[in-house]
């Protein structure tokens, strides 16, 4: 394929993570390394929303090695994010015509979108429209999601750091709960609408020091309240301080969310209901059934913004994925999402690849069956062995006056 010269644009979409800016740094590093092909790389503020407003920032002019390193250790989305759902091509072409006009005006030939499942939907739709309208572009999806639910890739940038935060926080909660002898149940609600990867990470401590939650419930298994009560009673019979990890998206066999009665019912642009309240629902159920001391803890957004507990493996791979996206695009690859392909477990090694984005968008990667125990209430050793390499290593951000130094765009 012939060399395509032109500017690039990069954006961030969906929920932020502790590693999404490391991926952005990788894209910028990649573009700067290919400055003979990509003279300028622009950042779109607030994803496609900002692009439609032509709210662009020249990233080529403002970054040096120091700032890129700071960016890699900065949580959340430095460019801002959005949750805009593009229409199907042919339904409302005015949006695509506007985008194409902006691409031509700014000589943009490379488009990098850092995001999760819904962002890959945007990449697929935009790829289809530009191809049908004879505007040569290289469009690459760059994965990001703490949910780890994108198919094809072994795992996603952002997941390892969120998993590390959860694993450490659960260790702290278990130790806090263990100081009293009064019978008590603590329910920890962890993010995860359709896949329980994050909640599975709560069990990692078992392989390190033998300490992990008594029970772990994922969306991959139908939740049964009577079975839950039996599980809790068995744990209370063994020791007084029971800790339970549960995904926010656990459902009963009929499809109802366990926390449905405590949720608002509000949905985002992609039709996803905002979930929370599962922990509270189980707290109330345990209180009514057993009458013991019980509390629920919702980790909430701390799971995705905890840069102080970044996984070095996660950050290093996030940068590699970003750089790899630019290398792939310059070499002629388009309409693909970058992937992380695990080569070996011991020692852990992974390579950066790519795959057809149309085979990834709008699909969900569930937790492997062999990672969930037969009772459906905990994680197997195989699951923990999959997770352990992803939380390995610690980063060393710069600190000033007791606080980390973050990059502000």
Image: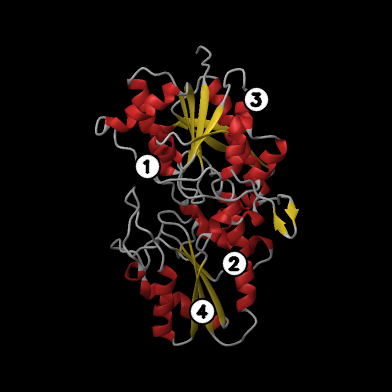
Q: Which residue is mark 4?
A: 185
Q: Which residue is mark 3?
A: 33
Q: CA distance from mark 3 to mark 2?
A: 41 Å
C-alpha separation, residue under disc 1 versus residue under disc 4 = 37 Å
Q: CA distance from mark 4 to mark 3?
A: 54 Å
Sequence-wise, the earlier of marks 3 and 2 is 3
Which comes sooner in the sequence, label 4 or label 3?
3
Q: Say how the picture is coloured.
A: secondary structure
Residue where numbered disc 2 is placed: 170
Marked residue nearer the N-terminal end (1 or 4): 4
Discs 3, 2 touching: Cβ within 8 Å? no
Instruction: Check disc 3 and report its element: helix, strand or loop.
Output: helix
Query: Crowding near pointer 2: few (<14 within 10 Å), some, many (20+)?
Result: many
- Where residue 375 appears, as percent x and y from the top left, is 45, 65
Q: Is residue 343 visible?
A: no
Q: Going 30% across and 64% down the picture, which residue do you hit? A: 256
342 relative position to 87: left or right: right
Per the rendering, the mark at residue 362 is: 1
- CA–CA distance in space, label 1 to label 2: 31 Å
What is the CA distance from the residue labelled 2 to the residue labelled 4?
A: 14 Å
Q: Position of residue 76 (x, y in %)?
A: 55, 50
Q: Give 100 or 278, whichever is nearer the viewer.
A: 100
Q: Secondary structure at mark 1?
A: loop
Which residue shows up at 58% across the image and 21% down it? 39
Above or below for 2 versus 20: above
Depth check, mark 4 against mark 3: the one in front is: 3
Residue found 47% across the figure and 77% down from its top: 232
């Amino acid at each position: 394929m012939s060399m395509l010269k032109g500017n690039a644009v990069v954006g961030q979409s969906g929920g932020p993570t502790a590693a999404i800016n490391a991926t952005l740094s990788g894209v910028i590093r990649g573009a700067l390394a290919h400055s003979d092909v990509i003279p300028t790389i622009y950042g779109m503020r607030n994803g496609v929303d900002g692009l439609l407003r032509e709210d662009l920032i020249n990233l080529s002019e403002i970054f040096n090695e120091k700032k890129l390193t700071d960016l890699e250790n900065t949580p959340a989305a430095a460019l801002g994010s959005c949750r805009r759902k593009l229409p199907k091509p042919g339904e409302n072409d005015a949006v695509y015509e506007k985008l194409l006009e902006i691409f031509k005006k700014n000589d943009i030939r490379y488009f990098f979108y850092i995001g999760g499942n819904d962002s890959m939907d945007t990449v697929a739709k935009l790829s289809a429209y530009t191809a049908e309208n004879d505007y040569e572009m290289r469009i690459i999806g760059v994965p990001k999601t703490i949910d780890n639910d994108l198919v094809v890739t072994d795992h996603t940038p952002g997941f390892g750091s969120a998993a590390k935060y959860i694993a450490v926080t659960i260790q702290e909660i278990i130790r806090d709960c263990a100081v009293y002898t009064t019978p008590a149940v603590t329910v920890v609600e962890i993010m995860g609408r359709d896949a329980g990867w994050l909640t599975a990470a709560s069990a990692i401590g078992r392989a390190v020091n033998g300490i992990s939650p008594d029970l772990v419930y994922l969306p991959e298994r139908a939740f049964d309240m009577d079975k839950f009560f039996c599980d809790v009673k068995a744990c209370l019979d063994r020791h007084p301080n029971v800790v339970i990890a549960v995904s926010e998206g656990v459902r009963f066999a009929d499809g109802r969310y366990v926390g449905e009665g405590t949720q608002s019912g509000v949905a985002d642009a992609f039709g996803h209901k905002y979930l929370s309240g599962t922990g509270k629902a189980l707290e109330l159920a345990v209180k009514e059934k057993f009458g013991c001391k019980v509390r629920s803890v919702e980790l909430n957004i701390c799971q995705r913004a905890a840069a102080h507990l970044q996984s070095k493996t996660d950050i290093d791979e996030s940068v590699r994925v970003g750089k790899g996206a630019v290398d792939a695009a310059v070499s002629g690859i388009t309409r693909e999402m970058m992937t992380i392909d695990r080569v070996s477990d011991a020692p852990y090694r992974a390579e950066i690849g790519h795959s057809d984005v149309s085979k990834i968008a709008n699909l969900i990667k569930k937790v492997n069956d062999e990672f969930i125990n037969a009772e459906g209430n905990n994680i197997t050793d195989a699951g923990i062995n999959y997770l352990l390499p992803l939380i390995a290593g610690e980063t060393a951000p710069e600190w000033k006056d007791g606080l980390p130094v973050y990059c502000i765009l």
